[in-house]
Image (spheres, rainbow, N blue to C red):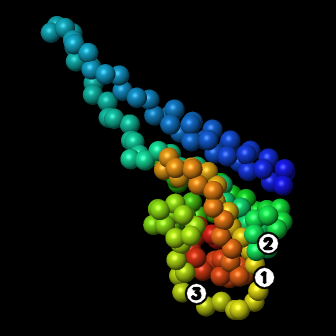
């Protein structure tokens, strides 16, 4: 359990540093000040692109078993939906879109209608971090890998 917490904390730190660096790369414009009538006008700068929401930085893990506590994570990926989709998730843009539709919750993901076998080999996906300024910590179990994949690109990693 301690190694899982250490791995997740390290991944969250990496995502937070990446998101902070992306935010620092776009300098803010200084407020307009009164100019002399004889001073040349400064060239206008385009305002930096801003998100309507607070940055989102998440860690997703995949565990074999019916709960996240059943075993150590087999895989972990990071997902940043801050200014541009990124992270180690194989399809960050599609995963961010799916998370947007689900309002940042694993429980609101919908099955895409993929046909799967009835094998019982449970797997659990966890989602931890910050979604649009709101802390999330959620887990969802699926009866097997095929069913997990049927819930879209967010759970496919």
The location of residue 147, given as percent across then percent down, is: 65, 82
Q: Earlier in the sequence, mark 2 or mark 3?
A: 2
Q: Nearer the viewer, residue 83 or 64?
A: 64
Nearest to the eye among marks 2 and 3: give it.
2
Q: Which residue is mark 3?
A: 114
- Splitting the image into 4 quarters, where does residue 32 fall? top left
Q: Is residue 148 visible?
A: yes
Of tags 1 and 3, the one toward the viewer is 1
Residue plotted at (67% across, 46% down)? 12
Q: Earlier in the sequence, mark 1 or mark 3?
A: 3
The label number, if any, that marks residue 121 in the structure image: 1
The quadrant of the image that shows the N terminus is bottom right
Dot 1: within a 10 Å radius of its alpha carbon, few (fewer than 14), some, or many (20 or more) residues?
few
Q: Is residue 75 left or right of residue 110?
A: right
Q: Disc 2 designates what residue?
A: 64
| Mark 1 to mark 3 CA distance (whole Å) | 17 Å
- Tell me, yes or no, whether the two marked residues, 2 and 3, touch with CB atoms within 8 Å: no
Mark-to-mark CA distance, 2 and 3? 21 Å
State the residue in front, 150 or 47: 150
Quadrant assignment, res 125: bottom right
């Amino acid at each position: 359990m301690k190694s899982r917490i250490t791995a997740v904390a390290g991944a969250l730190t990496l995502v937070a540093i990446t998101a902070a660096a992306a935010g620092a790369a776009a300098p803010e414009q200084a407020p307009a000040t009164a100019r002399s009538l004889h001073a040349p006008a400064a060239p206008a700068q385009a305002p930096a692109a801003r998100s309507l929401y607070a940055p989102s930085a998440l860690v997703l893990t995949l565990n074999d078993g019916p709960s996240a506590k059943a075993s150590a994570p087999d895989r972990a990926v990071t997902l940043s939906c801050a200014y541009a989709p990124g992270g180690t998730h194989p399809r960050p843009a599609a995963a961010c879109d799916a998370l947007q539709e689900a309002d940042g919750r694993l429980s609101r993901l919908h099955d895409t209608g993929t046909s799967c076998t009835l094998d019982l080999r449970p797997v659990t996906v966890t989602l931890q971090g910050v979604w649009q300024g709101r802390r999330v910590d959620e887990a969802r179990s699926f009866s097997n890998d095929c069913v997990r994949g049927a819930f879209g690109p967010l759970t496919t990693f």
